[in-house]
Image (spheres, rainbow, N blue to C red):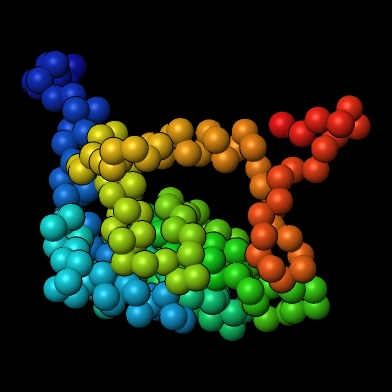
Amino acid sequence: MATENIFGSVVHFSRLDTLFDMCRANSLWPMTFGLACCAIEMMATGASRFDLARFGAEVFRPSPRQSDVMIVCGTINKKMAPAVQILYDQMPEPKWVIAMGNCAISGGPFVYEGQYGVVEGVGKLFPVDVFIPGCPPRPEALIEGILKLEEKLTGTRRWPVVTPPGLPGPAAAKAAALADPATIADDGSGAEMKSPPDAAGGQQA
């Protein structure tokens, strides 16, 4: 006798996945993996002043088998890379990775011509979901990164971005920066220079 589908159209796995993602976003269990100064900012984020528990990620786990988010902060050298890879492989699915700080993103100031011992970003080892630039990023930046990961899971943002009156919003500021890029003078003064003029004598777009 043929097997009947006793559930019919009651169970919709896409709906269940949406529900599961909502639960995961509200109960992230990060694994601390600090390698340099960014780890101090990560510790501060978990302390009472910034109160990471408000955002559903209060339980920092020392074991990869009990966590679903790896926060990599600091410089990864080639001797440490196999250990980082093993920890990532031991995390259960689904799992996500946050690269915190310039060193975790691209190697930071330790990448230069002739260097041989630094991995140029954790993205060379496994996929990264959220990048948090800075040297080191402040605790507020890590909180924003966790909110971005939650937004990636659920499609909605837990806390809206509030722009103070009189200031351009994030989208407007980004558009203005991309439309009129500026450079920094190389004479050490830190003076801002406009883009060099093009052949017609105008400013480059």
Quadrant occupied by the N terminus:
top left
Q: Relative to 194, is 184 above or below?
A: below
Image point (50%, 39%), residue name? 174
Q: Nearer the viewer, residue 57 or 175?
A: 175
Q: Relative to 195, is 144 above or below?
A: below
Q: Position of residue 116 (x, y in %)?
A: 73, 79
Image point (19%, 28%), residue name? 15
Image point (68%, 81%), residue name? 117
Q: Position of residue 157 (x, y in %)?
A: 25, 39
Specify whether residue 161 is in view. Answer: no
Q: Nearer the viewer, residue 39 or 49?
A: 49
Q: Is residue 44 left or right of residue 193?
A: left
Image point (20%, 42%), residue name? 158
Q: Quadrant of residue 137?
A: bottom left
Q: Quadrant of residue 47?
A: bottom left
Q: Relative to 38, is 148 above or below?
A: above
Q: Is residue 40 left or right of residue 160?
A: right
Specify whether residue 194 is in view. Answer: yes
Q: Nearer the viewer, residue 179 or 83?
A: 179
Q: Position of residue 62 (x, y in %)?
A: 27, 78
Q: Position of residue 162 (x, y in %)?
A: 26, 41
